[in-house]
Image: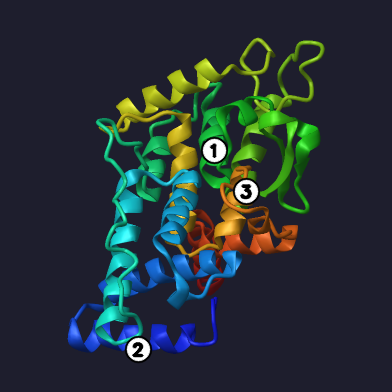
Amino acid sequence: METGKNSKDIVGRYRRYLKLEKGYSANTLDAYLRDVDKLLRYLAIEQVDVLDVKLEDLEHFAAFISDLGIGPRSLARILSGVRQFYRFLVVDGYLEVDPTELLESPKQPDHLPEVLSTAEVDLLEQAIDLTKWEGHRNRAIIEVLFSCGLRVSELTNLKLSNLYVDEQYIRVMGKGSKERLVPISPRALDELNYWFADRNEMKIKPGEEDYVFLNRRGHHLTRTMILIMIKRYALEAGIKKTISPHTLRHSFATSLLEGGADLRAIQAMLGHESIGTTEIYTHIDTSTLRQEILEHHPRNIQYDERQQADLLSE
């Protein structure tokens, strides 16, 4: 995404600089270019040209990324890529002053927010005994948290009437009773269907019929129950990180950001308020949101690859 007519040319020259003068590998080069792309997408929202950036703009960018739920370590790495880009702009004569000189890295707290890789989420789910009554329910819970980025309170309050299975969306009631539509992955829908087969056999308490996730007594779940469940499976899976249901929300945002998803799309899916000007919130239609999560969330990439492999093997 361009922030000015020169941005494409500048990025092209930066790519050549990283490849030829720095001698970076393809993976390192791609990582630096993704960092720049995140910045350019943000600047386009703010309508600031890449060559007119001030320290204040970069501080707002850092706050914007942090507000998406990205931890200090990931943010520090992104800002390192931005610094490298502006050093190039000075060296190559585009700028006289480097606006990143006084840009501070995020303070690293004693306990950094943990993020799970897709492989670790798989380990978490593999620790679940599917022969037990709650097995499919718990796997569906973990998959929905990871694939949709819900807050745990949003998950416990999720209703059957909020599921749009054919359209592959869920309607979420977030903070301040604000509703949003979030795309749900085919994998998460599969896990929900396995749970629904068990749920249909249950005796459900009056008034609880519309809740998606129930305990064995037919009541909807509490946040504490989900926290205990996830911590238990992490222990059984041998995951040493300190995790909670919110870890899966962080992991959702980090996976999308690292995959190159649109910043506004991530913000809309998480249900975050804008931290910048009101212009940041231009309307994003639901088809755009769906495309972002389908293209950039690792779960959907894996699902597509399996589908293609199945077709080839037929």
- Circle 2 residue: 13
Q: Are marks 1 and 2 in contact (CB under 8 Å)?
A: no
Q: Give the image location of residue 17, x and y in percent.
A: 26, 86
Amino acid type of the residue tagged 2 in the rendering: Arg
Q: Give the image location of residue 260, x and y in percent.
A: 48, 65
Indicate left or right for 144 with 128 as reference: right
- Circle 3 residue: 269
Q: Give whichever of discs 3 and 1 has the lower sequence position.
A: 1
The Cα atoms of the two marked residues, 3 and 1, are separated by 12 Å
Label 1: which secondary element = helix
Q: Give whichever of discs 3 and 2 has the lower sequence position.
A: 2
Extreme-front residue of the structure: 96
Evaluate whether residue 40 shows in this view. yes
Name the front one of labels 3 and 2: 2
Amino acid type of the residue tagged 1 in the rendering: Leu
- Quadrant of the rendering where the N terminus is positioned: bottom right
- Circle 1 residue: 145
- Quadrant of the rendering where the C terminus is positioned: bottom right
Q: Give the image location of residue 8, x and y in percent.
A: 47, 85
Label 3: which secondary element = helix
Indicate left or right for 215 with 138 as reference: right
